[in-house]
Amino acid sequence: MAHKKLIRFEAIKSFPNVFELPQNMEEQWTVFFKNQHPLVLELACGKGEYTIGLARLYPQKNYIGVDIKGNRIWRGALTAIEENLPNVAFLRTPIEGIHQYFTPHTVEAIWITFPDPQLRLSKAKKRLTHPRFLRLYQQVLQPNGIVHLKTDSPDLYYFTKAVINLFDLELLQDYDNLYAEQQLLPEHTIQTHYELLDIAKSNRIHYLAFRLNKPLDVEKDAVLKKLIFEHVAN
């Protein structure tokens, strides 16, 4: 397995659609995509199933999968090359650094699909819908930009709802049991490797879409921490 990872790490260095910790990339996305179509990010994209799936559905948008693990990115990047998908790229970087790679307020939407829910109380700040991450997203998202969360973790789902309520963000869609809905958009039905693993064993998929339409008061982070602690205690 370690040998396979090394091979994949080496392979993506030659992939034209993979950028590893690039410098001065902010203005270069239109050069790479050869158009000015809207940019959409998938964060912690893993093998890139959502990035690829969205790109197939909506060729008039450009999709960028972001992850630090190059051996996972390899799969999605290779699929994009094999299928000749010109609206797909992958960015290898920690999520904490995404604001370095995009001109402010140029990203239309962000998808977060089956991230590590970071269940331990001490890890709450690592949840990708924690306000410390949402503030980073606000730097790159267009005004009223949308964040999509798809998860099998009820803990992450309810945590994110608590964040939305606490900061009075605009909730667009809230599905406690996504696949029980009668009418779903095609993008809701894309399945990832981690969804199919059903790690949470929750027998349902949760989905939220919300706008980052307001400043996120740092002082409220302490209130959120208290809410998390009370939830765990109960």
Image: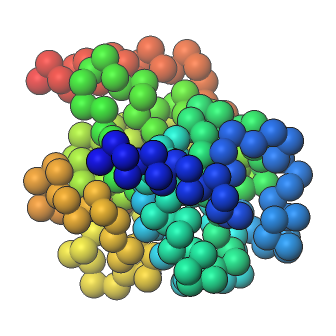
Q: Quadrant of residue 159?
A: top left
Of the 4 image quadrants, the one containing the C terminus is top left
Residue 122 percent across, percent down from the top left: 31, 17
Please tell me whether residue 2 is drawn above or below residue 48 in the rendered image.
Answer: above
Q: Residue at x 12, y 61 (%)?
A: 203
Foreground pick, 166 / 179: 179
Q: Residue at x 86, y 55 (%)?
A: 28
- The answer to whether 66 appears left or right of 200 in the picture is right
- The tally of labels here is 0
- The answer to whether 105 appears left or right of 74 in the picture is right
Residue 47 percent across, percent down from the top left: 43, 60
Foreground pick, 11 / 57: 11
Please tell me whether residue 212 is drawn above or below residue 89 in the rendered image.
Answer: above
Q: Residue at x 31, y 39 (%)?
A: 117
Determine if residue 145 is in view. Answer: no
Residue 6 percent across, percent down from the top left: 45, 45
- The answer to whether 64 appears left or right of 177 in the picture is right
Q: Residue at x 63, y 83 (%)?
A: 84
Residue 10 percent across, percent down from the top left: 56, 50
